[in-house]
Image (tube, rainbow, N blue to C red):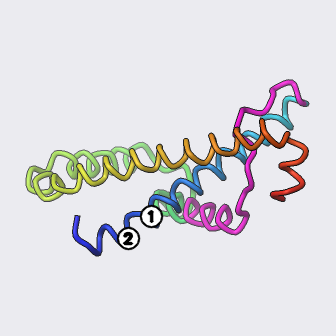
Amino acid sequence: TSKTGAFLKLPLINELAESIDGMASTQEANLIRASGGMVRPLPGGNGPVNTKRMEEMSEVFDVIKSAFMVGGGSSSSSPQEQLKLLRELIGLLTDEQLRDLAMPLLPELGSVVRNVAVEILEIRSSRAIRDVILGRENRNRLYT
């Protein structure tokens, strides 16, 4: 990794970890609400959710979804169009020249994924420890 790459890597890891934690917290809250409280919160779960970031993530998913929609914007494309898209994806994955070009990126990608997982564990474990020490009621008052 170059110095520029290293400089950008840490903020990328932090952003990804916080986004994933926020999405998980949102889904945990939905599960608890849908179960009527029968499902208990996980230790370190139900953390603060950055609503602006969640809106941005939703917009990104909408753009990706619309990019895969074929046939005038309908989400149900014909089997021929789906097959064509699948063939193009397979072609990209089996292209030897593209694979050789991407090979140096794979170790860095693996490193980012591992660091994101560690960051998520750190966020959730520190939240779980605060829950134990302060009690969930006090934590909710302090961090909301």
Front position in the image: 142 or 80 = 142
Which residue shows up at 37% across the image and 64% down it?
9
Decide: is 54 above or below 120.
below
Which residue shows up at 46% across the image and 47% down it?
78
* Quarter of image, res 54: bottom right
Tell me, yes or no, whether the two marked residues, 2 and 1, touch with CB atoms within 8 Å: yes
Q: Give residue 106's mark.
A: none
Decide: is 143 above or below 33.
below
Q: What span is colored magenta in the figure?
A: 37-62
Decide: is 22 above or below 32.
below
Identify residue type, mark 2: Leu
Which residue shows up at 62% across the image and 40% down it?
125
Q: Is residue 6 magenta?
A: no
Image quadrant holding the C terminus, namely bottom right
Q: Is residue 112 rendered to the left or right of residue 105?
A: right
* Quarter of image, res 39: top right
Q: Position of residue 132 (x, y in %)?
A: 77, 36
Identify residue type, mark 1: Leu
Q: Residues within 10 Å of mark 2 (few under 14, many from 20)?
A: few
Q: Position of residue 112 (x, y in %)?
A: 37, 53
User: Circle 1 sits on which residue?
Assistant: 12
Q: Position of residue 133 (x, y in %)?
A: 78, 39
Give the Cα distance between marks 2 and 1. 6 Å
User: Circle 2 sits on which residue?
Assistant: 8
Front position in the image: 26 or 137 = 137
Count of labels shown?
2
